[in-house]
Image (spheres, rainbow, N blue to C red):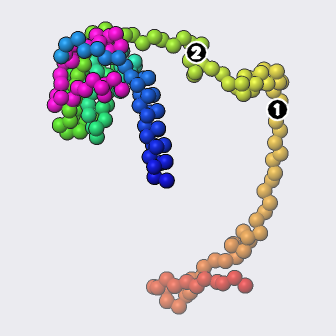
Amino acid sequence: MNSSKRERREDQLMKKAEKLAEYASEIVMQSDTQMLIDGHPYVLVKNYRDGFQTDKLKERFSQILTKYDYIVGDWGYDQLRLRGFYESGSKKGTPSQNIDRLMDYLYENCNFGCAYFVLHNLDVQKPTPVPKEDRRKNRVSSKQRKRKRQRQNNVYEEKVYEVHSRKPNRNSDKRNKMKAKTVGKNSRSRHFTIRQKD
């Protein structure tokens, strides 16, 4: 039983490794600090505590990161996390995405004293804009189109609602009959009795 489970687990791990190899990026090291990632030149600016590992970067690198001027990789719980930053003074993104705020990012979002590296992208790729007709927010569902057609075809009818008058409440008479009476034994003390329902 255990051997069959072990074999299935090994098969799953092999399939996972094959998928990772399919999606992995190609990294060619030209020198200690210069490299090509999928044909784009990068320079290793900082390598704190030997955080730069090419095999893990191959697995984790994504094409979306090519739009950033700098890529920061930090290690936490034996996993590499990549984040993109823009050039200082750039109007792209938010101010927290500028490379000037790198130390703030490391202090706030990373483990204390973790290993990290900074790559400078020498060939920044501009993301291609999505055509308007492909944008999902502009699409109209079939239900919405159907409702719109019905509204245009139908003549608006005025709805008339019946208004009912209120019925007199039976309990209101009983409440009016029940009143508190003051007892006139001692005028200084304010005692009263409550009449019970009959």
SS at circle 2? helix
Identify which residue, 159 or 54, lies in the foreground: 54
Which amino acid does the dot numbered 1 rest on? Answer: Glu
Quadrant of the drawing holding the C terminus? bottom right
Where is residue 184, by image quadrant? bottom right
Q: Which mark is residue 143?
A: none
Residue marked by disc 2: 134
> For mark 1, what is the residue?
158
Q: Residue at x 51, y 13 (%)?
A: 130
- In what element is the residue under mark 1? loop
Residue 37 drawn above or below residue 15: above
User: Is residue 49 in the magenta section?
Assistant: yes
Labels in figure, total = 2
Q: Is residue 69 left or right of residue 12?
A: left
Name the image quarter holding residue 167.
Answer: bottom right
In depth, the one of 51 and 136 nearer the eye is: 51
Residue at figure coordinates x 76%, y 65% from the top left = 169
User: Residues under labels 1 and 2: Cα distance?
Assistant: 40 Å
Q: Residue at x 83, y 30 (%)?
A: 157
Nearest the viewer among 167 and 98 is 98
Q: Residue furthest bottom?
A: 185
Q: Residue at x 53, y 91 (%)?
A: 185
Residue range corresponding to the magenta coloring: 33-59
Image depth: mark 1 or mark 2 in front: 2
Residue 35, image x, y percentages: 25, 13
Q: Position of residue 102 (x, y in %)?
A: 22, 26
Q: Are marks 1 and 2 in contact (CB under 8 Å)?
A: no
Q: Position of residue 108 (x, y in %)?
A: 25, 36
Assess whether residue 87 is covered by the magenta stretch.
Answer: no
Residue 172 place in picture, x, y as percent: 72, 68
Drawn side of residue 24 relative to residue 72, left or right: right
